[in-house]
Image (tube, rainbow, N blue to C red):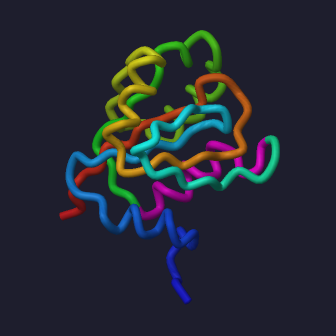
Amino acid sequence: MKKTKVINSDLSRVIATMGHFDKLAIGDAGTPVPKGTEKIDLAVTNGIPSFMDVLNNVLEELGIQRIFLASEIKTENPEMLAQIKKRLPDTPIEFITHEELKESLNDCKAFVRTGEMTPFANILLESNVVF
């Protein structure tokens, strides 16, 4: 039995295959996922698991160097933006449009669907090297 924090087998596998500059996306229950992008569906019901619970879990194992957020989060979900900034205070943030974020899902190793049902609760994590 795995001893580390991420015990979902699909999510653990994807994190283990990440290289420098690879991207992993985490998002709300309504995010459209391109056909060519692996979708790891963790959603159970409204709010379970939450976006922040999944993000915190992933960050236990994935080293990141930069994050991408939809610029719309600034006005449409400032509470979520504040939580992300609090969790990642020293990580550079690049704001892109929601449309650009959705297009970027084509270049992600996987998209992790949460039970989050608040607007623009989506993030792209760009992996770093851990040495």
Q: Given the current orientation, which residue lies at the most extreme top position?
A: 75
Residue 24 at what x, y percent from top left? 40, 47
* Labels in figure, total: 0
Q: Nearer the viewer, residue 14 or 91?
A: 14
Q: Is the magenta region chiefly helix, strand or loop?
A: helix
Which residue lies at the image location 56% right of the left edge and 18% below the top edge? 73
First to last magenta residue range: 47-61
Q: Given the current orientation, which residue lies at the most extreme right position?
A: 45
Residue 58 at what x, y percent from top left? 49, 57
Q: Is residue 71 above or below residue 18?
A: above
Q: Nearer the viewer, residue 31 or 115?
A: 31
Q: Is residue 79 above or below residue 26?
A: above
Q: Quadrant of the C terminus?
A: bottom left
Residue 78 at what x, y percent from top left? 62, 19
Q: Is residue 130 left or right of residue 73?
A: left
Q: Quadrant of the N terminus?
A: bottom right
Instruction: Give residue 79's quadrant in the image.
Output: top right
Which residue lies at the image location 72% right of the left edge and 44% below the top edge? 115
Q: Nearer the viewer, residue 110 or 89?
A: 110
Q: Is residue 48 left or right of residue 125?
A: right
Q: Nearer the viewer, residue 87 or 102?
A: 102
Which residue lies at the image location 30% right of the left edge and 59% below the top edge? 18
Q: Given the current orientation, which residue lies at the most extreme bottom position?
A: 1
Residue 23 at what x, y percent from top left? 33, 45
Does residue 125 show up magenta in the picture? no
Which residue lies at the image location 55% right of the left edge and 58% below the top edge? 57
